[in-house]
Image: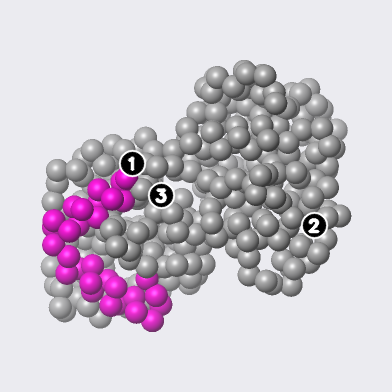
Amino acid sequence: MTAKGSHRILFLYSELAGYFLACAKELGKAEWVEAVRIIHWPVNPEAPFEFGSTDEYELIDKSRLDRGALEKTVTDFKPTALVCSGWMDSDYNRIARQWQPNIPVVLTFDNWWTGSLKQRLAVWTSPFYIRRHFNRVWVPGEPQLPFARKLGFSDEHTATGFYCADPEPFLKVWEARKNRVPANKLLYIGRYLPVKGVQELWSAFASLSDDFPEWELHCIGTGDLWEERMIHPKIVHHGFLQPHELTPHLIDAAAFVMPSKKEPWGVVLHEMAIAGLPLLASRAVGAATEFIDPTKNGAFLKPETIAEEINDSLKKSAEQLAHYSAKSHALGTGHTPIVWCKALKQLVST
């Protein structure tokens, strides 16, 4: 085990996200960590967030380095542990292979086991490929564990909780919601894509609108289905909003709806839990396994009964919604950047 305060953690990362950097910031403060360096893909022009190095971590854009410079950047850092986003980047794979015999090299992924030909091929070749590059695995939660085990990773070298929301802005929402009666408002935040189940959501809500005329569905986001969005007097389409513009909608929403047909995890569900919103999500949302208890804070949506589940939610009293809100908050605050750091520490110390 590496001595206290001497760990140098290197991330070979894909697209940066604010919630990941919140965890990296906490990691940089940890007493067992000396330094954190993050090599990452270029920032996605469709989501042009501005990220920069801090006192807690150093950011390096991979696109500015050729192969030799990339390997030198890693070697000069002298990592004691390496964490890599998936196995799709050949440069990252090469570095992982070089370091795997000497230090913990952690693979992260969020895929569920589906038994597809591609996944079966990954399992068949894992002893000769994946396991020669990586000796640890870190996944978001329970849905990813079967695939990790099939790839040959032992439970001792496996951790969950890789995705973690940045709690700070959502704790502020919770404080504002606590003593407030929510509006008759359901909230959806996400892309307008068929896989997100938004068309079924619109249809289900419209079918209930006559029976619940005081309720509205507010949808925040944009995407391929924007031009085909349902126009309805009780469905409000806000388009894309910046994070700070979401706050008023989170404060007065009665519940959050996430009807995705496929969602490997979905950090937004964790964010909404911290904020204290009752949650409605399909079982295809990975994060629902951790943040929804159908007896205490929400419901699982089924494509064929989505209208029934929403109908039941619209009938709940203010007292019931307040109870659901508190339970969501409790579930959401159980996983924090500090917990994230502890999971990594244990993973690289075994």
Would you place residue 342 above or below residue 302 in this image? Answer: above
Which mark identifies residue 270?
A: 3
> In the rendered structure, which segment of residues is drawn in magenta?
301-330
Which mark identifies residue 170?
A: 1
Badge 3 or badge 1: first in the primary sequence? 1
* Residue placed most toward the observer, 149 or 59: 149
The alpha-carbon separation of the residues under discs 1 and 2 comes to: 40 Å
Instruction: Please indicate, yes or no, whether residue 97 appears anywhere in the rendered image.
Output: yes
Q: Position of residue 236 (x, y in %)?
A: 27, 64
Queried whether the magenta region covers residue 321, the answer comes back as yes
Q: How many other residues sit within 10 Å of disc 2, few (<14), some (14-19) or many (≥20)?
A: some
Q: How many other residues sit within 10 Å of disc 3, few (<14), some (14-19) or many (≥20)?
A: many
Tag 1: amino acid: Phe
Q: Is residue 257 left or right of residue 132?
A: left
Depth check, mark 3 against mark 1: the one in front is: 3
The alpha-carbon separation of the residues under discs 3 and 1 comes to: 10 Å
What residue is disc 2 on? Answer: 126
